[in-house]
């Protein structure tokens, strides 16, 4: 059986690339050894169908061509949050200082009777009026000898106030039957005796009314006013007789009009003290221009403080938004001296961001009103009183957005595809296919133009490296709401270095990508929270190739001891082939030292020529070749030191010098006739 072992070993050295075939070594004969012997040991015919068993990656087509396929359903994906994000918005702050408020107008009235002032008149007038009271007689001339004072009733809606606007109207009605001349009135603040204003009426006809007014702005006045008549004269009625009645006199009225006050102590009627619309400019990116946004989650968090000594109602309204079809508005009660924080849930809000005429995008109008509630009691107030509030929109999650989103960059982290293609495993390089293709199948429901710069690098098990070198890819995208794009991008030899990448027989492909939005296409973007861009990869690699440098390499473990070949002086193997494959072959068998793992010997064979092909790269004639392998005593000695043999074959295709591609068919075949010549040591 020792002789048979030699034959099998030598046959393996030649049939390198048919290790996976269905070998039939039952055809090997067992000749009788002689000192010098030439004997046939194997005759067989092999087809590519025998050599390449189909699997999940290696596919036989109906036309007997062969291709390698590979697919990965989900290479990477881009979610809606990757393309568009909305951060919590910047805090909005405002402070309102109490400026001027309105209080109710008030009025005073006093009847100054003749009976009250008669004692202040000249003596002649006193005597005549007293003697003729209740009769018709000549009314005497009269002159006010000293000032006459009287108090208006105190106002019940304030203790004191400082006016910023308004007027006091002062009217005099002469109810006497004679004219009055040179009337002069001083209006005095009874609290401090200060003269507020002086009124002069040169002439008032009998039963007539005269009015004067003055501006209250800048005056501080208490609620008790005194009127002092400084002068008053009358020429009397002579010669006419008139009714003389002590209950007649002068009717004095004072009333305010359109008053506003800035400080004091008063009862405050309910009133609007501030109304303002501020704009929230959505903080997205420098170039984003949003038109509409629907938020599935949104909250207003606000804080307030008031030093105003009356309850304030804060009314908020988002005038360009709706929740369930209604404009959202909210009322917040702020009590005197109160500091508080509250949260308003505005989830499911739909916002129109185009209502501002100057900037018709990104703008959310935010209207608020401050209403001071009526006070039942007197309260102090002045311009140092204020109400401050700040608010922020946060916890924002969008359900739909449209507009222009600006340019976003999304980095796809590096990952690795384990090719796990058996056909690649025994090739060191040079598998130069004629038309390999990578197809990116993608689904896109993001209404934004997306560009992707892919980075793909193949790495072989021999650490050969090759980049795909593909330019940026622009993917189709939905241009109408509800549309979903299902499409493919083909990468081939016209737009990449895929031929060189496949040529290294990659065992893994590392990939990453930079994705960009809005590098092309329309500015009318839209997106839903469920929108997604997903991409898968498939490879279609027909075994049509042109190469002069396809390197096949494998390692065999061997264990030869001296006794295995001590009787052999020399062995030669002769192989006659009729090659119907469009593949030529140069073989080297490298012995590796078991101690230092370095090559110590190489056995080379002469060339196996490829078949002849037509202009389409299809075999039309098989080629005959003769190969000889010789082992001498030195080779056998080196085998003793060897645990591993590296079988290395360099394969070329027919007419590769002219760069003609050949197609591999499953019915291609090769015929082997193998014989052996051995010289055996004799005693």
Image (cartoon, helix red, strand yellow):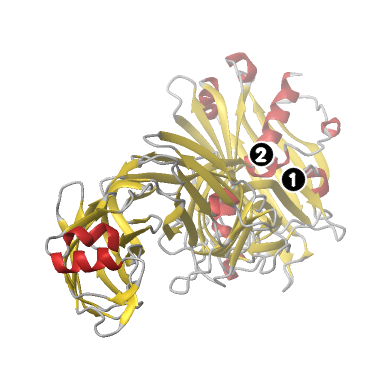
Q: Where is residue 105 in the image (x, y as percent from the top left)?
A: 39, 59
Q: What element carries label 2?
A: loop
Q: What element carries label 1?
A: loop
Residue 276 visible to the viewer: yes
Q: Name the residue under label 2.
A: 420
Q: In this view, does 397 lie to the left or right of 230?
A: right
Q: Mark 1 points at which residue?
A: 57
Q: Where is residue 523 in the image (x, y as percent from the top left)?
A: 54, 71
Which picture quadrant has residue 183?
bottom left
Q: Is residue 206 above or below residue 630?
A: below
Most foreground residue, 671 or 512: 512
> Residue at point 54% right, 50% down?
82
Q: In this view, does 24 lie to the left or right of 615?
A: right
Most foreground residue, 451 or 269: 269
Q: Position of residue 368 (x, y in %)?
A: 47, 55
Residue 86 visible to the viewer: no
Would you say the residues marked 2 and 1 are in contact, meaning their CB atoms lie under 8 Å apart?
Answer: yes
Check residue 30 in the rendering and tell me which mark sits there, or answer none: none
Q: How crowded is mark 2: few (under 14 residues within 10 Å), some or many (20 or more)?
A: few
For the C terminus, the image quarter is top right
Q: Which residue lies most toward the bottom here?
A: 239
């Amino acid at each position: 059986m020792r002789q048979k072992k030699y034959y099998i070993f030598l046959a393996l050295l030649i049939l390198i690339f048919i290790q996976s075939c269905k070998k039939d070594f039952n055809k090997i004969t067992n000749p009788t050894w002689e000192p010098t012997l030439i004997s046939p040991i194997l005759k067989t015919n092999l087809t590519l169908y025998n050599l390449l068993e189909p699997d999940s990656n290696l596919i036989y087509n109906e036309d007997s061509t062969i291709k390698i396929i590979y697919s990965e359903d989900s290479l990477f994906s881009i979610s809606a949050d990757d393309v568009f994000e909305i951060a919590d918005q910047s805090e909005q702050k405002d402070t309102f200082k109490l400026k001027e408020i309105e209080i109710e107008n008030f009025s005073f009235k006093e009847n100054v009777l003749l009976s009250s002032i008669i004692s202040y008149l000249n003596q002649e007038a006193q005597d005549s009026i007293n003697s003729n009271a209740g009769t018709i007689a000549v009314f005497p001339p009269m002159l006010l000898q000293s000032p006459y004072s009287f108090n208006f009733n105190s106002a019940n809606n304030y203790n004191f106030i400082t006016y910023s606007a308004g007027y006091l109207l002062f009217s005099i009605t002469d109810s006497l039957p004679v004219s009055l001349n040179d009337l002069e009135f001083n209006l005095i603040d009874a609290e401090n005796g200060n003269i507020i204003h002086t009124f002069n009426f040169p002439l008032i006809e009998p039963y007539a009314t005269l009015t004067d007014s003055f501006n209250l702005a800048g005056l501080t006045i208490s609620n008790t006013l005194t009127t002092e008549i400084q002068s008053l004269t009358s020429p009397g009625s002579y010669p006419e007789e008139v009714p003389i009645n002590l209950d007649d006199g002068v009717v004095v009225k004072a009333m305010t009009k359109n008053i506003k006050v800035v400080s004091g102590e008063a009862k405050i009627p309910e009133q609007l003290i501030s109304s303002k619309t501020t704009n929230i400019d959505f903080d997205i990116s420098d170039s984003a221009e949003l038109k509409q946004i629907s938020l599935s989650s949104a909250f207003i968090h606000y804080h307030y403080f008031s030093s105003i000594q009356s309850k304030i109602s804060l009314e908020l309204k988002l005038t360009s938004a709706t929740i369930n079809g209604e404009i959202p508005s909210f009322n917040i009660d702020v009590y005197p001296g109160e500091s508080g924080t509250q949260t308003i849930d505005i989830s499911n809000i739909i916002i129109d961001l185009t209502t501002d005429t100057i900037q018709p995008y990104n703008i959310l109008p935010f209207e608020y009103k401050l209403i001071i509630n009526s006070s039942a009691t007197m309260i102090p107030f002045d311009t140092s009183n204020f109400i401050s509030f700040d608010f922020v929109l946060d916890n924002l999650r969008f359900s739909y957005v449209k507009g222009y989103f600006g340019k976003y960059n999304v980095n796809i982290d590096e990952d690795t595809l384990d090719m796990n293609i058996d056909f690649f495993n025994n090739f060191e390089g040079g598998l130069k296919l004629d038309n390999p293709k990578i197809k990116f199948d993608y689904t896109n429901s993001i209404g934004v133009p997306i560009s992707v710069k892919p980075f793909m690098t193949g790495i072989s098990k021999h650490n050969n490296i090759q980049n795909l070198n593909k330019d940026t890819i622009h993917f189709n995208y939905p241009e109408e709401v509800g549309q979903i794009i299902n499409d493919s991008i083909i990468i081939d030899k016209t737009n990449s270095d895929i031929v060189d990448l496949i040529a290294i027989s990659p065992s893994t492909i590392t990939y990453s990508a930079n994705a960009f939005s809005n590098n092309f296409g329309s500015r009318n973007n839209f997106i839903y929270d469920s929108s997604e861009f997903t991409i898968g990869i498939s490879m279609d690699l027909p075994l049509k190739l042109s190469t002069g440098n396809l390197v096949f390499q494998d390692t065999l473990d061997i264990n030869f001891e001296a006794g295995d070949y001590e009787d052999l002086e020399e062995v030669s193997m002769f192989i006659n082939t009729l090659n119907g494959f469009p593949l030529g072959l140069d073989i080297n068998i490298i012995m590796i030292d078991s101690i230092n793992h370095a090559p110590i010997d190489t056995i080379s064979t002469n060339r196996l020529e490829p078949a002849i092909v037509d202009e389409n790269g299809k075999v039309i004639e098989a080629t005959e070749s003769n190969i000889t392998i010789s082992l001498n005593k030195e080779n056998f000695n080196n085998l003793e030191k060897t645990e591993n043999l590296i079988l290395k074959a360099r394969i070329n295709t027919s007419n590769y010098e002219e760069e003609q591609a050949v197609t591999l068919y499953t019915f291609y075949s090769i015929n082997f006739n193998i014989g052996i010549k051995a010289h055996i040591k004799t005693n």
